[in-house]
Amino acid sequence: MGNPKAFLTVPRKEAGYRPVHDRIHDFGEVEQTLNTKDRQEQASRCMDCGVPFCHWACPLGNKDPEWNDALYHGEWENAYKLLKKTNPFPEFTGRICPALCEKACILYHTTGEAVTNRENEAAIAERAFLEGYVTIEKPVRNGKKVAVIGSGPAGLAAANELNLMGYSVTVFEKNEAAGGLLRYGIPNFKLNKTVIDRRISVMEQEGVEFRYNEELIMKNEESSVDGTAVANSSLFTLPSSLKDYDAIVIATGTPTARDLKAPGRELKGVHLALELLSQQNRVLAGMTFSDEERITAKGKDVLVIGGGDTGSDCIGTAHRQGCKSVTQIEIMPKPPVGHNPNTPWPNWPVILKTTSSHEEGCTRRWNINTLEFLGKDGKLTGVKIQPIDWKPNPEGGRPIMVEAGEPEIIKAELVLLAMGFLKPEHPQYPENVFVCGDAANGASLVVRAIASGKQTARKVDEFIIKKKLRS
């Protein structure tokens, strides 16, 4: 701890965002960076706590005090080496992680101003690529092959870890490029896709093989009981392209979005959020779409249904496409500002979150239920909504929704459904098949997906070693 009084004398300083009038005209990253002096000064605020809860809160177990101290002393290469020990992709989490470590920081709990761990992490990662601290490793091969299905954060983490262990790893991706949610779900203004390409290039140079536009279907065969076809896990078959692999990792994420089956759902102009987000990212990558295929908010009143990060991403994308207005509705109550007594530490604080997209202009409403999509000649013109409230359920469990106002109509030519994703169901796989990330646990954070991918890689390694000892 190089400066034991910095947490008392140095206030938290964030890099902040580009001005609204500047950033809404492009899809460049909105977040700015601090200069080297200010960044090292922010790192000095870390108190090197005797019991650092940031270690515990981070799914990856990042050693924030160690690399913050190295950063403070200007030891950028050492800071990267310390960070890389636990986090294979700090350039991703440094941009899009909600920073669980910061909500666990003692400074957050005592002053409300946590150490800027996330920004510090991003700065270390960028300096590492800039100055060549990111080196290409050449693992010694062990003769075993592993297939990874899906190249989102969990699949990339599993592939990276297994490759460094010496396995020959092939990643199968159904889309035209790697990244999964990172590439097709998160807007460029939060994560520029060159950042993903840069990491994929490193992994390829280290020996990971990526095969694109290959969708592999994992399924059970059917057997017959009294003439009735039933699934039989003992007859599970792998796609022929996977039969030569010693283990398979399924990291296909949560591909099914939660839909809203209200009357009028079939109207033109009602879309799942990822239909807009993935298409826009593909457009920025150079792909073209016909006018009939193109989903755009240009000149339209937009309604976003769902109050989470995906909904926020839709708001920012709608602004950049040139929308007329954006309204976001959420069926749950408005969270409190700053502190929530109902979610005390060590729970994640459920408080009002205002993102860079919200700052760009948005009407936000809570306790709103969607009743019906309205249209004319097959095209969306508005949405009938109703204010609601929640009362305790006398039998326990989920509160009961009750009407709290008269129905009203919100004008909208484009509706984006951002209500989360359904947890996938899996059959009973053979013992050499492993599931990780959102595919195993349901939709969660990128940092948790990365952690799950790493853990699954270790499970694969243990399985293959035990199998070798048995044979």
Image (cartoon, rainbow, N blue to C red):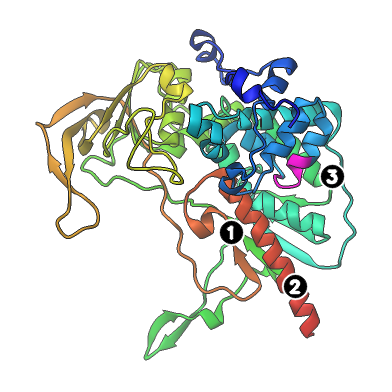
Structural distance between the alpha carbons of marks 1 and 2: 17 Å
Q: Amino acid at mark 2?
A: Ile
Percent x, y of residue 70 = 78, 32
Q: Amino acid at mark 1?
A: Cys
Residue on which disc 3 sits: 205
In the rendered image of this protein, does residue 92 appear above or below residue 166?
above
Q: Earlier in the sequence, mark 1 or mark 3?
A: 3
Residue on which disc 1 sits: 436
In which quadrant of the rendered view does residue 404 lie?
top left
Percent x, y of residue 339 = 37, 32
Residue at (86, 31) in percent of width and height: 132
Percent x, y of residue 353 = 41, 29
Residue at (56, 36) in percent of width and height: 105
Whether residue 64 is visible, yes or no, is yes
CB contact under 8 Å: marks 1 and 2: no
The answer to whether residue 458 is left or right of residue 20 is right
